[in-house]
Image (cartoon, rainbow, N blue to C red):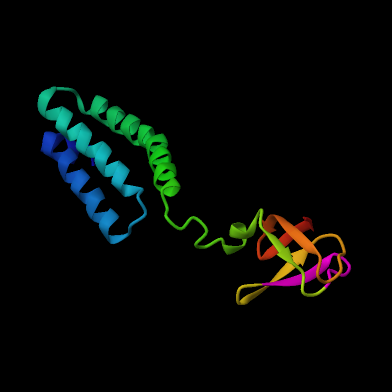
Amino acid sequence: MMEYLVAWGKWSWLILAAVFFVIELVAPGAFMMWLGLSALLVGIISFFVDWPWQYQLIAFAVFALASIPLWRRFAHRVEGQVDQPFLNRRADAFVGRVFTLEKPIVSGNGTVRIDDTVWRLSGNDAPAGSRVKVVRADAATLVVEPA
């Protein structure tokens, strides 16, 4: 493989970048994109700097490793801008809200109707009609305390 890399010179990095981008298009996961960008950077630099293939390979590895924290930073920024943050975590949307129990909590377990859904509750025993506050969501169970 190194013979091909050396024989194709500067263009080998651009071809490798194109291969990574095509793989990213076929099997998206945002992993090959960063390898493609790293190969593209090395290819662009190779047009301006005459450097041995060993240094090119090291630069590719450094760019590929440096892209990991960049990707994590980018992913956190994009995740923070979601317009429906509780889309797949409906129970988390109820944390901090207060509800009135239609049925009592017995032996630490109960249910409450919120909109059109009946949710399981976990908390101290409480009679029907008492008000409880959701302190956290444990999967599909709402953990409550007296409000």
Q: Nearer the viewer, residue 124 or 61?
A: 124
Residue 130: x %, y % from top left: 81, 65
Q: Quadrant of residue 51?
A: top left
Residue shown at 33%/33% (left/top)?
A: 61
Which segment is the magenta one?
A: 104-113
Residue shown at 65%/55% (left/top)?
A: 95
Lateral position of residue 35 relative to residue 120, left or right = left
Check the image and name the residue furthest to the bottom.
Answer: 116
Assign the N terminus to one quadrant of the image. top left
Q: Is residue 64 visible?
A: yes
Residue 146: x %, y % from top left: 81, 56
Lateral position of residue 68 relative to residue 141, left or right = left
Q: Compared with residue 64, is residue 130 higher up or lower down, i.e. above or below? A: below
Q: Quadrant of residue 43?
A: top left
Q: Nearer the viewer, residue 6 or 62?
A: 62
Q: Quadrant of residue 103?
A: bottom right
Q: Nearer the viewer, residue 60 or 90?
A: 90
Q: Is residue 9 visible?
A: no
40 falls in the magenta region: no
110 falls in the magenta region: yes
Q: Compared with residue 124, is residue 77 higher up or lower down, i.e. above or below? A: above
Assign the C terminus to one quadrant of the image. bottom right
Residue shown at 38%/34% (left/top)?
A: 65
Q: Compared with residue 42, is residue 132 higher up or lower down, i.e. above or below? A: below
Lateral position of residue 42 relative to residue 50, left or right = right
Residue 142: x %, y % from top left: 71, 62
Residue 88: x %, y % from top left: 52, 63
